[in-house]
Image (cartoon, rainbow, N blue to C red):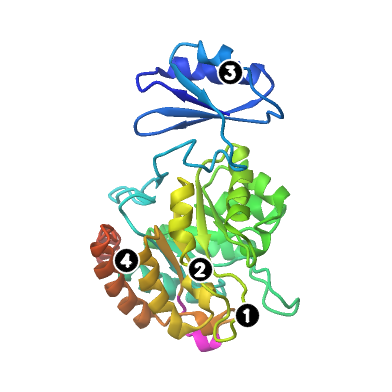
């Protein structure tokens, strides 16, 4: 069920409706929009007593949401969610995911050492990235592959944030790592392998930080949105979806990047969606073309792997761009973004200039 408040409803009226819903034994999820506030109701196994709620001050209507995902749906919130991050440095502007600005997340697949992280961070921030990605915990197919540096890797990324003004995106693979990622990072990533790890999704929903949720390698659109619903149902409404390729019969690429899911998500859900062309293709020479296509199709951002020496990378070197390739990609991304009414904020470059001159 969904309670739609009147445009002029006060905060006190919204709070009163939420309290009434919770007195029935349900959960109330207040989601302010540009024109109105909607209150989602979860935990109800049957019909909610609509008449009692409809008569409350400030309520416009009570409607039934027929989709299995409720909080994720545009029925609940017609306006696209824009996730806002505070500025890292005093003179820096706030950063957003969603809206007009195109979010650029870049960095190595895995944090290998401090020197590697700093070399890559310096190059990607100069090119215009606002976020730094890197794995401290790496769920690998083989138990003998590099599994990440753990908390030491998180500490290195925290240094990267302090030095370069980049916000940190990194993956949590279980309860223990999620607690540490929540402590160090700005965005908690839930990887494709954990998209339907429902206990982990619930734990991420109780975290303080925004969550970047990657689509599972065989997940349908509905399964993808239902995974986001798990997070939001626990009270964390700052969720970013990420298309990273699905498994098909194709053998010319690691995965098949499903760019059609971007407009499909945007029609059904208010959540922002970004694209990962690195995991989506697994081939360095396909990352730039698919990045261009992702921006053209309307994605809210990109998450791209960049490594200063990919031939010696401990993880996913074959799909990592060289820094010069990332520079060239960003020039093209800006050109395409302008055509579709988006922009890559130039403030990231200005911030590096200030840091470099200090």
Q: What stretch of residues is rendered in magenta?
A: 306-312
Q: Position of residue 190 (x, y in %)?
A: 60, 57
Nearer the camera: disc 2 or disc 4: 2
Q: Kindly indicate the quadrant of the structure image that contains residue 208.
A: top right
Residue lying farthest to the bottom in this orientation:
311
User: What label sits on residue 249 in the rendered view?
Assistant: 1
- Alpha-carbon span between mark 1 and mark 2: 14 Å
Counting residues from the start of the chain, the first of labels 3 and 1 encountered is 3
| The residue positioned farthest toward the right in the image shown | 143
Residue under label 2, please give it. Answer: 258
The residue under the point 34% across, 49% down is: 99
10 Å crowding of disc 1: few (<14), some (14-19), many (20+):
few
Asked if disc 3 and disc 2 are in contact, CB closer than 8 Å, the reply is no
Q: Earlier in the sequence, mark 2 or mark 4?
A: 4
Left or right: 176 in relation to 136: right
Please tell me how crowded label 3 is: few (under 14), some (14-19), or many (20+) other residues with Cα within 10 Å.
some
Name which of mark 4 and mark 3 comes first in the sequence. 3
Is the Cβ of the residue at disc 2 closer than 8 Å to that at disc 4?
no
Depicted 198 relative to depicted 338: above or below = above
- Whether residues under marks 1 and 4 lie with C-beta atoms below 8 angstroms apart, the answer is no
Residue 234: where, in percent of width, then height? 63, 38
Q: Is residue 159 visible to the viewer in this orientation of the structure?
A: no
Query: Residue 50 shows which numbered tag?
Result: 3
* Marker disc for residue 128: 4
Query: Label 1 to label 4, Cα distance in Å?
Result: 36 Å
Q: CA distance from mark 4 to mark 3?
A: 50 Å
């Amino acid at each position: 069920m969904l309670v739609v408040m009147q445009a002029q409803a006060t905060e006190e009226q919204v709070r009163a409706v939420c309290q009434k819903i919770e007195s029935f034994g349900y959960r109330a999820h207040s989601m302010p929009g540009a024109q109105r506030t909607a209150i989602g109701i979860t935990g109800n196994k049957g019909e909610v007593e609509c008449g009692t709620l409809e008569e409350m001050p400030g309520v416009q209507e009570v409607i039934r949401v027929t989709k299995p995902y409720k909080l994720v749906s545009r029925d609940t919130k017609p306006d696209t969610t824009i996730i806002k991050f505070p500025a890292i440095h005093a003179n820096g502007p706030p950063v957003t995911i969603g809206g007009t600005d195109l979010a650029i997340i870049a960095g190595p697949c895995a944090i290998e050492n401090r020197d590697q992280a700093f070399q890559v961070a310096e190059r990607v921030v100069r090119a215009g990235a606002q976020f730094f990605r890197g794995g401290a915990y790496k769920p690998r197919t083989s138990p003998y592959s590099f599994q990440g540096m753990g908390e030491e890797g998180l500490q290195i990324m925290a240094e990267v944030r302090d030095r370069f003004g980049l916000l940190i995106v990194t993956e949590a693979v279980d309860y223990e790592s999620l607690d540490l990622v929540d402590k160090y990072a700005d965005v908690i990533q839930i990887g494709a392998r954990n998209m339907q790890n429902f206990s982990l999704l619930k734990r991420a929903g109780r975290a303080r930080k925004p969550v970047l949720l990657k689509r599972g390698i065989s997940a349908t659109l509905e399964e993808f949105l239902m995974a986001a619903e798990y997070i939001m149902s626990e009270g964390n409404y700052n969720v970013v979806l990420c298309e990273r390729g699905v498994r098909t019969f194709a053998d010319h690429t690691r995965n098949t990047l499903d760019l059609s899911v971007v407009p499909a998500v945007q029609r059904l859900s208010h959540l922002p969606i970004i694209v990962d062309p690195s995991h989506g293709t697994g081939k360095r020479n396909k990352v730039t073309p698919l990045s261009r296509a992702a921006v053209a199709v309307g994605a809210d951002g990109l998450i791209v792997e960049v490594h200063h020496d990919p031939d010696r990378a401990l993880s996913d070197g074959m799909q990592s761009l060289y820094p010069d390739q990332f520079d060239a990609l960003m020039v093209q991304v800006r050109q395409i973004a302008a055509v579709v009414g988006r922009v890559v904020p130039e403030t990231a470059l200005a911030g590096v200039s200030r840091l470099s001159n200090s």
